[in-house]
Image (tube, rainbow, N blue to C red):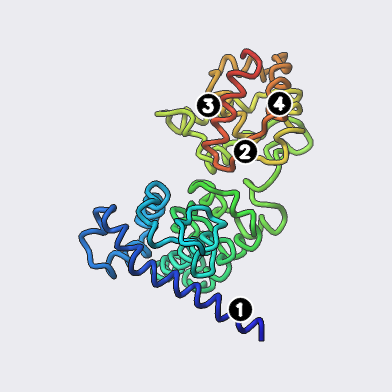
């Protein structure tokens, strides 16, 4: 009986969230977002829930102007709720409400674009949603919904909860490109450790694997206005890194191929090709790499967002040893 009562209470909480979204919340958002203000309340609600970019804008308004929602998003004491763990007056946490919104938006998007789901239409939108439901929780995932559409269900099952580690469009697209045959033998490239970029049986970088990582992580962002050909040259220059320098990085960054490769590309972008070669090339200054790694052990990256990680790496490289 207690389980039944709890289920009713939870269902009531969900319905309260939905009602607030369709009425008071959307009315506030209409006053702040021009594209919504021109529509009826129902039209504005449907646009927000159907279009991930519009929904992302709604979340940004809520976070930046939370004061506007003080009479709507309340905790059990009648105060404005802004912390995700806060229990709302409806009996659900703010995090629960956000997850509800993200999941509803994903389900709508998958159903609307069912013909584009991998499998030639054999995979239904509801099947894709069912495989992803437990991995849809956070507002930052909103802009990734169109890219989640490309993920085959076997990939989603393989990645599991680690999907939360992938916060960028290019990374999700990279996961989508993995073949089901490959993932049956080994992890997807961006989920693997740094040994994946090394030539088998040797301690040197395989340029083709590094190029694939470069594309899936969009490392071109570090080299503005560079062509694909120029990026190929960057990859080739990084690939000459000597085994002793690469080995010095392994204990600190080697468990995550994204961190490991991200650091190599950041060094190249910050110092330039000649300086990179003087540190990582044959007979280079491996002591510099060790100094950087010591700094990273003392202060590892705290964020999973790649842009934040790269900023952290920049600080270590520029301040961590006088390079």
Is residue 56 toward the left or the right of residue 255 in the image?
A: left
Q: CA distance from mark 1 to mark 4?
A: 50 Å
- Discs 3, 2 touching: Cβ within 8 Å: no
Comparing 74 with 229, the one in front is 74
- Please rate how many residues cluster around mark 4, counting C-alpha atoms within 10 Å: few if below 14, some from 14 to 19, many from 20: many
Pair 1/3: label in front: 1
- Residue 303 % position (x, y): 59, 40
- Residue 189 % position (x, y): 64, 47
| Residue 217 visible in the shown view | yes
Q: Residue at (45%, 56%) from the top-left corner?
A: 80
- Please rate how many residues cluster around mark 2, counting C-alpha atoms within 10 Å: few if below 14, some from 14 to 19, many from 20: few
Is residue 53 toward the left or the right of residue 315 in the image?
A: left
Helix, strand or loop at mark 2: loop
Q: Which residue is mark 1?
A: 6
- Discs 2, 1 touching: Cβ within 8 Å: no
- Residue 266 % position (x, y): 56, 27
Q: CA distance from mark 3 to mark 2?
A: 31 Å
Comparing 61 with 190, the one in front is 61
Pair 3/2: label in front: 2
Q: Which residue is mark 3?
A: 233
Helix, strand or loop at mark 4: helix
Q: Residue at (62%, 46%) from the top-left corner?
A: 190
Q: Which residue is mark 4?
A: 293
- Please rate how many residues cluster around mark 3, counting C-alpha atoms within 10 Å: few if below 14, some from 14 to 19, many from 20: few
- Kindly give the residue lying farthest to the left in the view shown: 38
Q: Earlier in the sequence, mark 2 or mark 1?
A: 1
Pair 2/4: label in front: 2
Q: Which mark is residue 62?
A: none
Helix, strand or loop at mark 1: helix
Q: Which residue is mark 2?
A: 302
Q: CA distance from mark 1 to mark 3?
A: 61 Å
């Amino acid at each position: 009986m207690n389980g039944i009562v709890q289920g009713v209470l939870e269902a009531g909480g969900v319905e309260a969230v939905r009602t607030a979204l369709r009425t008071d919340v959307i009315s506030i958002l209409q006053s702040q977002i021009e594209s919504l203000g021109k529509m009826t309340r129902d039209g504005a609600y449907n646009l927000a829930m159907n279009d991930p970019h519009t929904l992302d804008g709604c979340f940004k308004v809520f976070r930046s102007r939370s004061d506007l929602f003080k009479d709507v998003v309340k905790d059990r004491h009648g105060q404005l709720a802004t912390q995700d763990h806060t229990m709302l007056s409806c009996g659900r946490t703010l995090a629960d409400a956000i997850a509800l919104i993200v999941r509803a938006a994903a389900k709508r998007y998958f159903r609307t674009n069912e013909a584009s789901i991998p499998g030639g239409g054999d995979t239904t939108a509801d099947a894709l949603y069912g495989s992803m439901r437990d991995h849809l929780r956070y507002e930052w995932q909103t802009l990734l919904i169109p890219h989640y559409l490309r993920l085959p269900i076997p990939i989603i099952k393989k990645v599991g909860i680690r999907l939360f580690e992938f916060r960028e469009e290019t990374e999700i697209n990279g996961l989508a490109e993995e073949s089901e045959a490959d993932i049956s033998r080994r992890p997807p490239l961006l989920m693997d450790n740094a040994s994946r970029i090394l030539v088998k049986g040797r301690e040197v970088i395989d340029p083709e694997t590094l190029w694939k990582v470069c594309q899936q992580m969009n490392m071109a962002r570090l080299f503005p206005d560079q062509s694909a050909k120029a990026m190929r040259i960057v990859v080739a220059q990084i690939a000459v890194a000597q085994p002793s320098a690469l080995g010095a990085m392994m204990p600190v960054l080697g468990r995550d191929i994204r961190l490991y490769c991200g650091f190599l590309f950041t060094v190249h972008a910050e110092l330039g090709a000649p300086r990179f070669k003087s540190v990582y090339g044959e007979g280079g200054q491996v002591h510099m790499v060790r100094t950087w790694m010591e700094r990273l052990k003392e202060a590892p990256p705290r964020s999973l967002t790649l842009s934040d990680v790269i900023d952290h790496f920049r600080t270590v490289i520029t301040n961590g040893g006088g390079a």
